Image: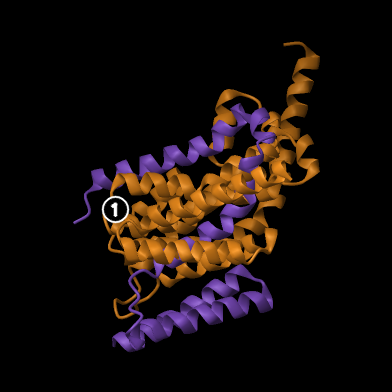
Chain colours: A purple, B orange
Amino acid sequence: MHDPTYILVAVLISASITWLLRALPFAMLAPLRDSRPLAVLGDRMPVGIMVILAAYTLRDTEPSSFASIGPVVVALAVTIGLHLWRGSMTLSIFSGTALYVLMASMIAA
Amino acid sequence: MTTTDVETAVLDDRDTRSEVAAGWRIVLPACAAVIPLGLALGVLVVKSGLPWWLGPVLAAVVYAGSLEFLLVGMLAAAAPFAQIAVSSLLVNFRHVFYALTFPLHRVTGRGWKAYSTFSLTDEAYALTANPESATWSRARIISIQATFHAAWVGLVALGAGLGTLIPSSVVGLDFAVTALFLVLGMEAYKVRRSVPIPILALGCALVAGVVSKENMLVIAMGLFVAALVGTHLVTMRRNRDA
C-alpha cells in the first residue's frame, strides 16, 4: 500500500531542506543578522505557522456532526486550559490526547 | 612523540571525557522531557498504517520534531512531493535564526560542523542559548547534540514497537499532533503576545481549507507569509513617509 521508494524519496527531500535551513544561514550569517524583514518574520511566523498546522490536523472534522466536532472542542479546551494553568507541555499534550482518544473510541465503538 | 606530547594527549583525553559528561548533565533533562513525544511519534507511525521502520528513519534522518509528526500524516495520505517540500521549508524556517547565536565556531572540523548543523534542533538551540556556550568545547556541544539525537531515535523506535500492541479499537491518537502544535503555538505566542497574528493565521487556514483541502497547508502558509511581508512593507513605507 505504501511504496517504500515514495517514502524514502519524501524523507530525503524533507531531510535535505531541513539541513539546508540549519546549515546555510551560518554561511550568510553577517547579512542575515542585519536583515530587518527576516527578523520581523522570525518573531511573527512561529505562532501563526503553529495555528495553521493545528487547523490542518483538524481538516477532516465535520462541523455539522456533533460526534465529530464534540470531542475536538472538549479536548482542545482541556489542552488549552491545562497549559494556561500548569504550563507543562507534556501534561497538556498527554491529558488532551488521552481525553480525545477516550471520547473518540467510545463514540466509534 | 616526546614525553610532553604524551602528557598532553592524556590530558586531552581526560578533558574530552569530562566535557562529554558535562554535556550529558546539560542534556539529560531535555531527553527525559521528550520521552512521551518520542513514544507518541513511534506509536503514530504504526497506527497510521505506515511501516514501523519509518519511525526510527524519520527520527534519525529528518530529525525535526514537529515536522516528523506532520510528515507521518502526509506520508500516510501519499501527499505530493511539492507539498512535502513546501511544508518542510515553512515549518522549519525558524531554524535559520538559530545561526545567529549557536556556538558553531567552537565546533572545529568540517565533519563535526556538518553534524552539528544537521542536529541543530529546537532543543539543541535552547540548550546552547546562553552566553557561556560561546566558550564550551566541541566535545561538550557534540555530546549534547549526539546524546539527544540518539535518545530521540531510541524513543521513537520503542514507540513504534509498542504501537503494534495497542488494540485497533483505540482511535484518535493523532490528536497528539493537534495538541502538540496547539501548545507550541501557545509557547510561540508568548514572544510577542500579539492577538492579531494568530487570528490572521487562523483566517488563512480557514480560507485555504475552503479553497482546497488537499492543498490547504501550502495555500494557508503562503497567504500568511504574504500577509506578514505585506504588512511589514506597508509599515516601513508609512514610517519612512512620516
Residue B189 in view = yes
Image position of A43 (left or right of B72):
right
Which residue is found at the position 21% from the left and 49% from the top? A3
Report in which chain the residue with disc 1 lies: B
Image position of A39 (left or right of A67):
right
Q: Residue furthest front?
A: B241
Image position of B176 (left or right of B184):
left
Name the residue beneath numbered marker 1: B79
Q: Callout 1, which amino acid?
A: Ala
Label 1 element class? loop
Q: Nearest the camera: B30 or B162?
A: B30
- Quarter containing the C terminus of chain B: top right
The answer to which quarter of the image holds residue B35 is: bottom right
Residue B21 in view = no
Task: Give residue B130's position: percent from left, percent from top.
Answer: 77, 46
The answer to which quarter of the image holds residue B75 is: bottom left
* Count of numbered badges drawn on the protein: 1
